[in-house]
Image: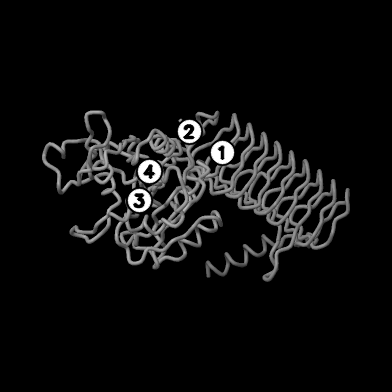
Amino acid sequence: MSDMAVSTIVLAAGFGSRMKSARAKVLHEIGGRSMLGHVLETASALRPASMAVIIGDHAPETGDHACAFNDKINVYVQSPPRGTGDAVRQAMAMLENFDGAALVLFADTPLITGKTLSLLKAEIEDNAAVAVLGFTPPDPGQYGRLKKDAAGDLAAIIEYADASDEERAIALCNSGVMAFDAAFLRENIGALKNDNAKGEYYLTDLVAIARRQDKRCAIVSADADEVVGVNSREDLAAAERIFQQRMRKKAMTNGVTLFDPDTVYFAHDTSIGKDVTIGQNVVFGPGVEIGDEVVIHANCHIEGAKISRGASIGPFARLRPGAEIGERARIGNFVEVKKAIVAAGAKINHLSYVGDASVGEGANIGAGVITCNYDGFSKHRTEIGDGAFVGSNSALVAPVRIGDGAYIGSGSVITKEVEPGDLAVARGRQSAIKGWAARFRAAHEKKKNS
């Protein structure tokens, strides 16, 4: 078996009217990545010689999205929409001098795996003209059925409306995903006709054409979850559930403890080390990297953050993009960190906001401390040195620098640099008026009683 080259064509021209959205259907996200992005990422793992995305003229942003993923992707417009065969025909220029396997994928079928695509490619390498991806759903419903011949290859795709009772009893259904020998596809796609009720050109008709030419048509079977199509918000939620279950299983297989797996939500690119413990109701947005032996307590929201070995996060902590948490650092309950570097061993244990800042090694940030980073027009940085101690309920008005080992008295508003080793206290001097409280109460009681 040769290492055959592969090209991919992703169909993304549908209107997606059932989504009830101004956004193109295939740009809706699962795990923080668009459905189109999922398909392109999976296809890219095969290192294709060329890639195409077929869009409709109603959604040019879909083409922009594809090019942002990879500026070498060929974008073709299908206008008007006239079926899957017509959509693939738009990409024939890309395959003009290509010999290999051409995979046809759907941008609204985002959960297909690289392993399955490799199996489709392998059938073309094994001299099949066409390979069709089948699946066995719990309820076959009105899916087209895949009818096998005596050798176990594909004899025909039978549409439900045209199927006999015997053919409707076939459990193996057509997913729509296909692979072709590129030369066969080039030579025969022009033979597709639209003499059907919808007036469309169906790519599946190439199976009948291949059989008439005595060419082999293969079947590859996939799990039903892989070929879940998304046409509505309900479908999107169902696909998200499947994606999250995959990610949870992958995490636990790789040495992560999830106290309540069904309540932990991952992004497509969440990276987690070994011996990590994650509590209940934790949500990861895109761009999170977690080192070994990290503990993330319950009810945290983390996005765009890097957490180093042995750090402790939460409960009820929020790490926003640009947060970098050092080894053995502690971010406690109701702490928000944004675009800030918290060095090894530093502690921000409760009720604080640290944004656009750096916190030195071993520094201690007390309860209720705020880095006042925004002046209404621009963001400014706060620098807190190694071993510094910032007392509770202090406000650090940026730009400002707290030196190594400095102390900030609780309740201070710091607007100027504090030198290393100094104590800074910036609050009104406490005074007392003897007996004032008793006199105040007595006067008001007398007034009330009268």
Disc 4 or disc 1, which is closer to the eye? Answer: 4
Q: In which quarter of the image is residue 411?
A: bottom right
Q: Residues within 10 Å of mark 2 (few under 14, many from 20)?
A: few
Residue in view at x 80 percent, y 47 percent: 388
Q: Quadrant of residue 325?
A: top right
Q: Residue 187 carries which label?
A: 3
Residue in view at x 30 percent, y 61 percent: 82
Where does residue 264 sit, x and y in percent of width and height?
48, 40
Where does residue 129 sit, x and y in percent of width and height?
34, 41
N-terminal-most mark, 4 or 1 = 4
Q: Is residue 16 left or right of residue 160?
A: right
Disc 3 or disc 2, which is closer to the eye? Answer: 3
- Is residue 402 or residue 32 the one in the foreground? 32
N-terminal-most mark, 1 or 3 = 3
Label 3 to label 2: alpha-carbon separation:
22 Å
Q: Which mark is residue 179?
A: 4
Disc 1 or disc 3, which is closer to the eye? Answer: 3
Kindly state the secondary structure of the residue where label 4 is placed: strand
Q: How crowded is mark 1: few (under 14 residues within 10 Å), some or many (20 or more)?
A: many
Q: Is residue 404 left or right of residue 113?
A: right
Q: Which mark is residue 2?
A: 2
Residue beneath disc 1: 297
